[in-house]
Amino acid sequence: RPARRRRSRLPHDAPKRQSPPGAPYGDGRETSGLRLESALGLPDVCEDRCMSSESDFALASVLIGGREPRAIVIVDYDDAWPDRFARLSQTIRNAVGEIALAVEHIGSTAVPGLAAKPTIDILLTVPDVADEPTYVIPLERAGFVLRVREPGHRMLRTPLKDVHVHVFAQDNNEVQRYLDLRDWLRVDGEDRALYAATKRRLAEQQWSDMNDYAEAKTDVIVQILTHARAWRVRQLYAPERLSG
């Protein structure tokens, strides 16, 4: 009788499909830009966008520890957040050394004046996301816990869940998304106010998981990212740059 073929393991580091433009991981999203439909739970929250079983399975396959119902609390901007990031950045660099190609403060706590969940989001770029022993083990020794493992992306956090460290390779498209969104919100008051109002409105609802809350912000973030990318292009091709 012919031998049965062994099933391959989940290809966590197979080449990642290009995800549709959506919300970057920071600001609540733990997992990747797969368009996970929002909000399991109460009908008035779910409406007509309940998460499909396929998307639910995809989320369960990458979250270490499973779903976590959590209250979403939005607070006014705290002037202490940049200093806290600076200390965390040094902790990360001390832990992983030269593997850290860049350590950036991202998400809403990186935007002065923007209301946010009091969670510091950090972007760490490394040469090879699949080479976990070079950064996951050192970060775990420094007190972080691995929460997400998926193609091209890892996320570690503190036991108190108040710091998220998103790890990507330097050439991943998500890296520029993070920086574009952050930098644009720092300079544009109108989109900053739109984003704050959206978060406060959504925080009043009940969510089965933080990723569902983050997914519900996708349409607004896509709109803001469109403005951010146009602004970035103008910055890159400004006449003073061309004449220099």
Image (tube, rainbow, N blue to C red):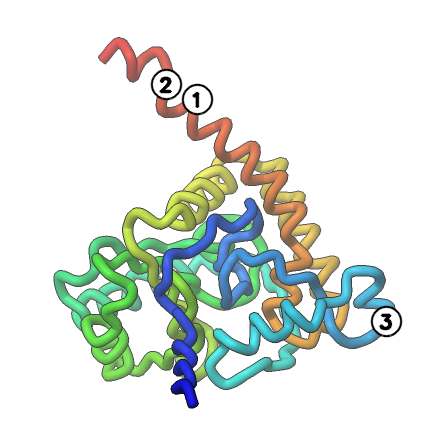
Left or right: where does residue 104 sit relative to residue 206? left
Q: Quadrant of the C terminus?
A: top left
170 sits to left or right of 108: left
C-alpha distance separating marks 3 and 1: 44 Å
Query: What is the number of the mark on residue 47?
Result: none
Which residue type does callout 1 highlight? Arg
User: Does the residue at mark 2 contact the one at mark 1 (Cβ under 8 Å)?
Assistant: yes
In depth, the one of 211 and 133 nearer the eye is 133
Element type where label 1 sits in the image: helix
- Could you tell me which secondary element the residue under label 3 belongs to? helix
Residue 222 lies, with reference to residue 196, above or below; the image says above
The residue that mark 1 highlights is: 234
Counting residues from the N terminus, which is met first, the one under dot 3 or under dot 1? 3
To which quarter of the image does residue 137 belong?
A: bottom left
Asked which secondary structure carries label 2, the reply is: loop
Q: Position of residue 85 (x, y in %)?
A: 34, 62
First reached walking from the N terminus: tag 3 or tag 2? 3
Residue assigned mark 3:
43
* CA gap, disc 3 and disc 2: 48 Å
Residue in the picture at 50% in, 53% down: 24
At x 80%, y 67%, the residue is: 46
According to the picture, the residue beneath numbered tag 2 turns out to be: 237
Q: Amino acid at mark 2?
A: Tyr
Tell me where residue 70 appears, x and y as whole percent: 63, 78
Q: Are marks 3 and 1 in contact (CB under 8 Å)?
A: no
Q: Position of residue 103 (x, y in %)?
A: 28, 57
